[in-house]
Image (cartoon, rainbow, N blue to C red):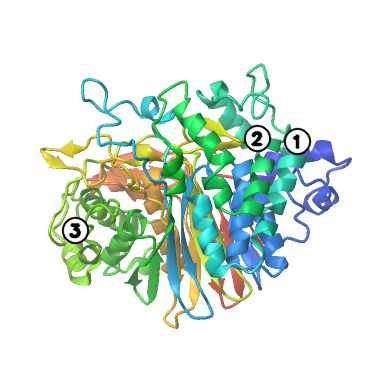
Amino acid sequence: MPAMLMNFLPVVTRMCAVFAGVALLGACEARLEGPPAVSDLKPGFAQKHMIAAAHPLAAKAGLTMLRDGGSAVDAAIAAQMVLTLVEPQSSGIGGGAFMVHFNATNGAIDSYDGRETAPASAHPRMFLDTQGKPRGFFDAAVGGTSVGVPGLIRMLEMVHKDHGKLPWHTLFAPAVKLAEGGFLLSKRLAGILERERYLRETPGAQGYLYHLSGATKAPGSVIKNPALADTFRQIASGGARAFYEGAIAKDIVAAVRGAAKNPGGMRLDDLARYRAVKRKPVCGPYRSWLVCGMGPPSSGGVTMLQILGMVQDFDLASMAPAAPAAVHIVSEASALAFADRNAYIGDPDFIKVPTTGLLNAGYLRARAKHISLQKSGGRRQPGAPGARTAFTGAAQQTDKGHSTTHLSVIDGDGNALAMTSSIETIFGSRLMARGFLLNNQLTDFSFRPDHRGQPVANHAAPGKRPRSSMSPTLVFDDKGDVVLAIGSPGGSRIIGYVTKAVIGALDWKLSMQDAVDLPNFLSRNRGTEIERGTALEKHRPSLEALGHQVKLISRHSGLQGILKTSKGLQGGADGRREGVAYGD
Ligand code: GLU
């Protein structure tokens, strides 16, 4: 039985008189609160269309839209609204997102930037203490100062105008129904709530995710959110404007400015001014494929393409999946790519990012020459892909293990998308407005505005977008057909998680699920990270013998992918979280 269903078993047992396996879950279909009936959903394989998302209720909402003749974008919007409700720790309308989209009719590949922007009150020293030192992560993240102007709704409205088929308001129906009727608290979310230190104090969280006494609600509790249902209704009928101007905007501003801790300076005109941006995706060759991802202000696409560009001169296909030699090569390439990432990538509307130079084939070949099969090169320095415009200090790192979400969709017309969406860390800023959580995305800016006398590319500034690592990715074959849609949460480790799954599917010919399940391994230029409790642990001595400084990481990826094969669509959903892929 899939891990995600195990989470719900106690609840399902209570809901249904008898429990005798997956088929009987169909008997619970009428109760929308729990996991959807799976008897007719065939997780993992499909011929026509498919959605892979981080929660079964979200995947089901997306599938409903696909069955109603909706496009990939329609499915993604419906799923994202449900995720706002059922995965409040990860993403939602109080946050931002990036999407890479393929239009099968005209072959266009576009990317959409719904990243949060800093309000006019932001400034480069906003996360320094009175002595001028960077503040602790949660000291800065919790409260109003870290909240960026949410970008998700404007971006979704833009993609819907470009690629939606169903009317906008219909896409909110599943989320409204669940917010009003309730959904069942999963064991995983109950555990996250129990371990959470800050949200208990948040006005709006008690009586909702916690009891009024402050105690965590038990797994299987029915969670309702009428305030969010009302918010959804307003956006459904009024469009993005209902969110960015008027009563909802006023409440966002009030929550940020009135925060008990770190009151922020966001104003109504910061919200009214917010614009999503349609950008050219970054694309590059990987062997016979074309890989397209999100360009700056995300570092995801460029860094991934650099890693792939460097490893393509090595015969990974001849190595066993995640064999030590393969882990060595990919980690070495990743360390080199992260050195460049930290030096050059920030918001392209504010700094000159040398994207073309970073992805130049000759440059990547020269960088790949630094990879020795005999020995790790250790900590790497950035290369010189073009005129250096700035130097970024390494971003602060924290355990973002349970936040952010990724969904992938391929519809019946062959349109495909990958969307990664986030409120940054778990439960974002821990501030709520009208039933949803507000992001803390501004802590993705470098806390230090300068480094060794030079300005940092990713420093905070009014209107600026903080650098991201989100890596929604589409892969195309040599005929231009989409073959893979994938992405993951996981902070700056996202880049490594997605790269691993892409190599797993393309080089090692793994099924989508096996590529997702493959143990995670990566480097962020600060040691080689391998996934705890997996077969990789036994390769630690071989990696150390090659000079790697090996660190163990937890099981925190949330890869959601769809692989198009000659036999149909294969879904892969990360059992490390609650994901599932549904299709017909
Ligand atoms: N804020 C992060 C980013 O944009 C994502 C956080 C996470 O994945 O947990 O890169």
The label number, if any, that marks residue 10 in the structure image: 1
User: Percent x, y for residue 508?
Assistant: 44, 66
Which quadrant would residue 414 be assigned to in this image? bottom right
Q: Nearer the viewer, mark 1 or mark 3?
A: 1
- Sooner in the amino-acid sequence: mark 2 or mark 1: 1
Which quadrant would residue 52 be assigned to in this image? bottom right
Residue occupying image coordinates x 47% and y 45%: 150
User: Percent x, y for residue 222?
Assistant: 74, 34
- Sooner in the amino-acid sequence: mark 1 or mark 3: 1
Could you give the CA–CA distance between mark 3 and mark 2, rounded to whole angstroms?
A: 45 Å
Residue occupying image coordinates x 10% and y 38%: 453
- Is residue 574 in view? no
Contact flag, marks 2 and 1 (Cβ < 8 Å): yes
Q: Please, what is the three-letter code of the amino acid marked with disc 2?
A: Lys
Q: Which residue is mark 3?
A: 372
User: Percent x, y for residue 396?
Assistant: 30, 36
Tell me if mark 1 has few (under 14), some (14-19) or many (20+) residues whose alpha carbon lies within 10 angstroms of its own. few
Q: Which residue is mark 2?
A: 187
Q: Total number of numbered labels?
A: 3
Q: Please, what is the three-letter code of the amino acid marked with disc 1?
A: Pro
Could you give the CA–CA distance between mark 2 and mark 1, rounded to whole angstroms?
A: 9 Å
Q: Secondary structure at mark 3?
A: loop
